[in-house]
Amino acid sequence: MNIDIFGSCISRDPFELESNRYSVGKYMARSSFVSTIHGKKFDNKTEFDLGNNFRNRCLNDDLQKESVEYMETSDSPILLVDLIQERYGVHQYNEGLYTYSHDYRVSKLPIGKIIRYDEHFEMFKDQINKIANVLSNYEVVILHEANLTPVYYAKDQLLSKLAINDTDSYFMQNGSKYYNLFKEHVPNVYSLKINGYIGTELHKWGPGKAHYEDEYHEKVNSGLDHIINHKEDFYYLKNFGQY
């Protein structure tokens, strides 16, 4: 079964483990929903090279709104979502909204008015019904209520700290507002939330705020199995209050 992913590596990493039973349909990364759902595309003549095909594709998807077009017609029955990338905020340029990601900043493309924090959340709130409508194409939307980790296990198993900037800190404190709003408005959503784990230096990309230990990803895979195999039971509980 194919599962599409909209979110960060914390939702993509579990698919690399043997415990995962599913294939990735399309991985849509490094974009804010606020940008993705906004209709205005960037100038088609724009050229950039980030030195990596994946990074180029992600930025192009955000600029040209490819992800929303894909999700509206995808054949994958399930979408896995996390909202960590909402922390990037967006920038408003020539009446368009585009994710203010690291890739955008190093692309040397022009930058407009930067919108972050509470103002960005209000924009997310204003767009939530459009988001729900786009995601209605999927039979199931699994909301991975992931957050960032400020600490990780070094190779010697001692705890080390990661640098947390203002945008990271805002999402770590306010991410639940995004997730709760998403759950309230997306009718086909099932929640997956895992606590008690931190990052690791042994991650294939090294230590990072979304680079969790394998045990976390094993729990994600168990959660995916449980939701997919028992979604009818969840539906009954959600709509009738008992089972």
Image: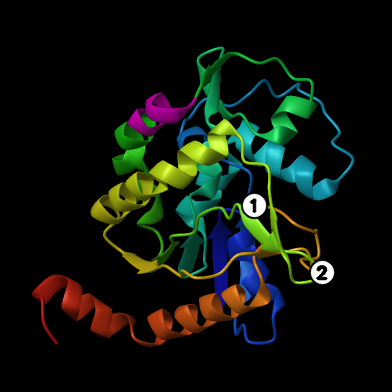
Residue 109's spot in the image, x, y percent? 74, 20
- Label 2 element class: loop
* Picture layout, residue 111 above or below residue 177: above
Q: Position of residue 201 (x, y in %)?
A: 77, 63
Which residue is at the front of the view, 152 or 145? 152
Residue 24 at x, y = what percent?
63, 69
Does 54 appear in magenta? no
Look at the image and tell me in which quarter the C terminus lies.
bottom left
Could you classify mark 1 by the number of other residues whose Cα lies within 10 Å: few (under 14), some (14-19), or many (20 or more)? many
Q: Nearer the viewer, residue 105 or 150?
A: 150
Res. 32 visible in picture? no
**Residue depicted at 39% across the width and 24% down the height:** 119
Please give the name of the residue rendered at 36% of the width and 67% of the height, measured from the top-left corner. 191
**Relative to 220, 142 lies left or right:** left
Q: Nearer the viewer, residue 99 or 169?
A: 169
Residue 117 is covered by the magenta coloring: yes
Q: Which residue is mark 2?
A: 155
Q: What span is colored magenta in the figure?
A: 116-122
